[in-house]
Image: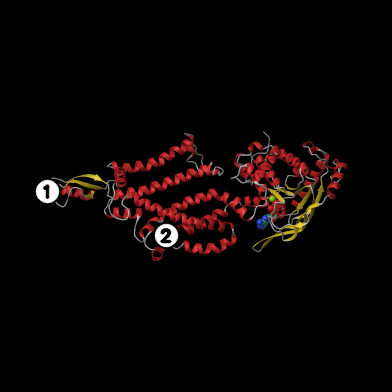
Amino acid sequence: MPSLAASWRLYGRTDRTARGVFGILAVLLPLLTWSAVSYLPFIWHPQILITDPGGEDYLESGMRMKRADFNRAVDEMRAKKLPAPQGIATNPVYFPSPGEVLSAFAHAFTSSAPTGAEHSITQAFGHSIRIIFWGFVISSLIGVPLGVLCGALPAMARLIEPSVDFFRYLPAPAFGALAVAILGIYDAPKIAIIVIGTLFQQILVIANTTRKLDFALIEAARTLGARGLRLLFRVVIPGILPDLYRDQRILLGWAWTYLIVAELIGTSSGITWFITQQARYQHFDNVYAAMALIGIVGLGTDMVLGLLARKFFTWKRENA
Amino acid sequence: MPQNSLPDYRILPLDVAERMAHIKQRECVLKIDHVGKVFTQKRHQTVALEDINFDIHRREFVCVVGPSGCGKSTLIRILAGLEDTTSGRILVDGQPVNGPGPDRGMVFQKYTLFPWMDVCRNVMFGIEMGGTSKTEARREAMQWLQIVGLEQFATSFPHQLSGGMQQRVAIVRALAARPRVLLMDESFSALDAQTRLKMQNYLMEIWRKIDITIVFITHDLDEAIYLADRILVLKPRPGRVEEVIEVPLSRPRRATQMTSDEFLATKAHLEALIRSFGDNTEETDEGEEDFNIPLLTLVTDKAE
Ligand SMILES: Nc1ncnc2c1ncn2[C@@H]1O[C@H](COP(=O)(O)OP(=O)(O)OP(=O)(O)O)[C@@H](O)[C@H]1O
Ligand SMILES: [Mg+2]
């Protein structure tokens, strides 16, 4: 497997097999590590889950305690010639095993909690996705054209970028109370937070991408008689499109990071509501199931978007 | 070099002299009128060009040569309108130019085909910018591609073509927009010797067939002599016209002419001229002398 070795060299070449092998390992290795820590009792397992309290009266079965404390209890009982407590090594409650998360995952999709605005994880998550979608669409409708114009027109850049830079440094959550006061307590302020969190970065990132377009192409187009709007629409925009697309992919991830904040203001809702609710009752397996769902949906979207990029932008060498 | 056995490069053969006289009677397409260019960076000023005066006639082929940094690229960028003059002006058909325009096509040294368009659409670009409809533009573009023998690559993308093919497409892309003048800045310098010779022949073939005036920049003296009717020699610091040479070679040109006495005489003169610029400048240019090679890298110069 020379290509596997080559993949470890700086800027080395990869081929299909190597990419496949690493792709599978990328999923398998974390899962294997997680399983090993969860199921092999000699790895970590810092606590003891009591199965039989023996003669120690402050113990109950189902309790978790530190291994050292358990050993002390055992020694004590032995010294008093009482039945020693029994227990099995276990991980803390905040570290569920893959199996537990998987069953919580399945459970979350099939059962419905009768409280709150949304009844199940799917409904909660659906609501979150709607917030993200509208937040990102609104941000893009403003940010993409403005970014391209800032990148292509020096006057626009001079006029707009200073104030964008100012707002960029204000943390989006700081607008939370303001957004609720102006937009009410339901979805509007949540969408607004996503827009505020994404838009200012978007303008600057896309302006930069536009500026990085090979200037020789602009000059070539000019000597061919292109100017004004035709230069913009026939050369600038198609030329930056793959990079613009990549920026949008990154910015979509960015929008997700504002979701939790957005969903906590006003009436809490969506996947955040689900997570806080479950964490309150120490249902960490449900919490992890919800987090896994976010991760899987995020990864899935990005992979689909990546595949589409390879299909659309074959002319860009990095996609070839 | 038995230099004195070569003829004087200034003596034009009869047919060439006749042709030169004929060219000079034609109207002046491109007039460089007292052009000067100063680059200012902070407090530092570089005089790139100083008082350049030159008239280029219709269907003339002019090459510009000169040592590196003498302002060749600056001059051609000014002609294209990509750079402003500090003083003086450029006239195309008697009209002063302001900014780039479709009357002056340009082929760059770098490959500048639009990578997201296939070859045919690249060639169509300039035609469409002139207001021609898409179907008509496509028809014209295919004709142009036929001229350079690339019609079977019409649907290929630039990154699928070799460097020479890309430059051929770039040339027809520029020509398809029907410019009065074609400007070329070291357009063949990234190509290997054989491809370059082929491209030179292509270019002269096209030039013979259509009504186009060409200004071609090169640092390759062979190329300049082989292609040009007249060679404009620039001298560096500041960039000025040192000499205008009328090339004493008849047309159509063949590669075999490169060993003729006239060719060699012209080349010897150009070489001497350009070497003389290097002598009186003390700056660290690409001079052959005074290379400080670290001792360890020296290998023996004795043959084994
Ligand atoms: N944008 C610029 N800003 C400042 N100085 C410049 C700029 N462009 C060119 N110059 C200077 O102008 C002079 C002429 O440069 P130019 O690129 O025209 O040379 P050239 O003859 O094309 O050289 P070469 O043969 O190496 O391409 C050089 O001294 C260069 O440093
Ligand atoms: Mg140059």
Label 2 Cα crowd, 10 Å radius (few <14 / some 14-19 / many 20+)? many
Residue A9: % across, % down: 49, 41
Locate the C terminus of chain B by quadrant: top right
Which residue position is annotated with label 1?
A80
Q: Which chain hosts label 2?
A: A
Residue A138 shown left or right of residue B116 in the figure? left
Q: What element carries label 2?
A: helix
Residue A205 shown left or right of residue B271 in the figure? left
Q: Which amino acid does label 1 sit on?
A: Lys
Q: Which of A3 and A42 is in front in this view?
A: A3
Q: Which of B142 and B4 is in front in this view?
A: B142
Which residue position is annotated with label 2?
A193
Q: Which chain hosts label 1?
A: A
Residue A108: % across, % down: 30, 47
Label 1 Cα crowd, 10 Å radius (few <14 / some 14-19 / many 20+)? few
Query: Residue at point 56% right, 50% down?
Result: A240
- Which of the 4 image quarters holds residue A30? top left
Q: Is mark 1 on a helix, strand or loop?
A: loop
Would the CB of label 2 be found within 8 Å of ligand 1? no
Q: What residue type is labelled 2?
A: Ile
Residue B42: % across, % down: 64, 63
Tell me: residue B68, above or below residue A169. above
The residues bearing labels 1 and 2 have C-alpha atoms spaced at a distance of 63 Å
Q: Residue B228 carries which label?
A: none
Count of numbered badges drawn on the protein: 2
Query: Residue at point 53% right, 49% down?
Result: A243
Locate the N terminus of chain B by quadrant: top right
Query: Residue at point 44% right, 63% down?
Result: A170
Would the CB of label 1 be found within 8 Å of ligand 1? no
Q: Which of A43 and A219 is in front in this view?
A: A219
Quadrant of the picture in which ligand 1 is shown: bottom right
